[in-house]
Amino acid sequence: MKLRGLYAITPEAGDVERKVRLALEGGIALLQYRSKTRHPAQAAAIVRMARDYRVPVIINDDVELALELDAAGAHLGRDDGDLRPARQRLGPRILGASCYDQLERARAAVEAGADYIAFGSVFASPTKPAAVRAPLSLFREAKTLGVPLGAIGGITLENAPQLIAAGADLLAVITDLFDAPDIRARARAYGKLFV
């Protein structure tokens, strides 16, 4: 599985399933199900929907839910547990890790079995305004790790090209995708950046 392209992250929205369907129709590469409260039924519906589009779903912060739903994998941040046991539990599934602005954390994550790493916030983020900022130079430095690199935080169609040029393989987007007037068209526009 090639991890490259638009990595849509579900918004906290009442009509999340409708919005996700539009993003899937627009051709996203990867989808992360993220919710502050556990909604297994909603997560299951989104995993089923994404399968119809052959888009892998990563469950944020919850290895057990990823296994329960037979999702494509899980993504863990610094407070979500150790990566090594997660790697063992997930088997061949995808394991992603948040590395914020820290190359050493990224190196340790890869050694622990992460399939991709994410840096950010790369720009000021409406979702996490207090998040630490990751410099674009980090992507060039992290290329030696040999895994796909994700960027998250304040990404828009306008600033996305500089992230790809810096070495980002995945652009994790919430607001600029799911708050767009035409979600399907916005997803397609992001996809064209990777052609």
Image (spheres, rainbow, N blue to C red):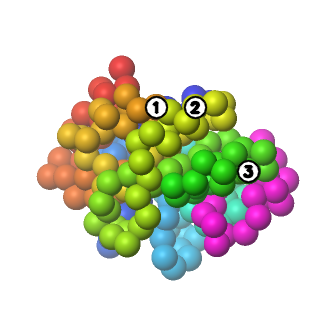
Expressed as whole percent of the image width and height from the top left, the position of residue 97 reads 62, 54
As measured in the structure, the alpha-carbon distance from the residue carrying label 2 to the one carrying label 3 is 14 Å
- In the image, taking residue 191 as reference, residue 81 lies left or right, namely right
Q: Residue at x 66, y 70 (%)?
A: 80
Query: Could you say which quadrant of the image residue 17 lies in?
Result: bottom left
Residue 57 within the magenta-colored segment of the rendering:
no
Q: Is residue 170 visible?
A: no
Per the rendering, the mark at residue 143 is 2
- Kind of residue at disc 2: Lys
Q: Residue at x 83, y 60 (%)?
A: 85
CB atoms of marks 2 and 1 within 8 Å: yes
Q: Residue furthest bottom?
A: 37
CB atoms of marks 2 and 3 within 8 Å: no
- Kind of residue at disc 1: Gly
Residue denoted by label 3? 108
Between 195 and 101, the one lying in front of the other is 101
Q: Which residues are magenta?
A: 74-96
Secondary structure type for disc 2: helix
Expressed as whole percent of the image width and height from the top left, the position of residue 43 reads 53, 64
